[in-house]
């Protein structure tokens, strides 16, 4: 299954076995984006995260007068992963680049159901997510010194 090969490359799923990745693949839904299509809008709530399968996306913050690009993300990177923790407001907007993008969507309800059935999967994913958040916070704090 091609999606499990992609999931093996996703840092959020590092430490999971092939069989565990197959369980995650089973809750993924493919989404295709046209060039420039908005997938996540800043300051709206969301219940899903996305894994980039093909193409790339631009992550940006919309200010009062203009938008400021933050980063371009590509294959095997994730967007919207904070929706697995809570359904709070999105901190940035995300749109497909000029070539468009193919993504896999995981909604939080399906993810929670999977974790209730397979606690170890939930533990590993949440540990990896916490590690990523800790790294980003430390990096941001060091940048402000």
Image: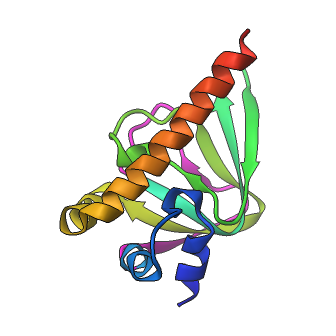
Q: Residue at x 54, y 81 (%)?
A: 3
Q: Residue at x 75, y 42 (%)?
A: 71
Q: Residue at x 30, y 63 (%)?
A: 120
Looking at the picture, how far across and down is residue 38, in whole percent?
Answer: 60, 51
Up/down of 20 relative to 109, above or below? below
Main structural element of the magenta stretch: helix, strand or loop?
A: loop
Residue 10 falls in image quadrant? bottom right
Residue 97 or residue 114, whichever sits in front? 114
Residue 142 or residue 28, whichever sits in front? 142
Residue 63 visible in image: no
Looking at the picture, how far across and down is residue 122, in whole percent?
Answer: 32, 58
Left or right? Give the position of 55 relative to 45. right
Left or right? Give the position of 118 relative to 68. left
- In the image, which residues are magenta? 26-47
Residue 100 falls in image quadrant? bottom right
Looking at the picture, how far across and down is residue 23, in whole percent?
Answer: 36, 78
Left or right? Give the position of 18 relative to 63. left
Looking at the picture, how far across and down is residue 112, in whole percent?
Answer: 25, 58
């Amino acid at each position: 299954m091609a999606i499990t090969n992609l999931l093996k490359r996703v840092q959020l799923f590092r430490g999971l076995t092939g069989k565990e990745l197959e369980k995650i693949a089973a809750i993924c839904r493919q989404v295709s984006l046209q060039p420039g299509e908005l997938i996540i809008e800043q300051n709206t709530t969301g219940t899903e995260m996305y894994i980039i399968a093909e193409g790339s996306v631009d992550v940006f913050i919309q200010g009062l007068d203009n938008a400021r690009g933050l980063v371009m993300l590509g294959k095997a990177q994730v967007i919207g992963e904070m929706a697995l923790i809570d359904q709070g407001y999105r901190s940035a907007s995300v749109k497909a680049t000029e070539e468009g993008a193919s993504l896999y969507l995981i909604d939080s309800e399906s993810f929670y159901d999977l974790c209730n059935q397979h606690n170890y999967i939930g533990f590993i994913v949440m540990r990896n997510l916490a590690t990523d958040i800790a790294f980003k916070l430390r990096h941001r704090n060091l940048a402000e010194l």
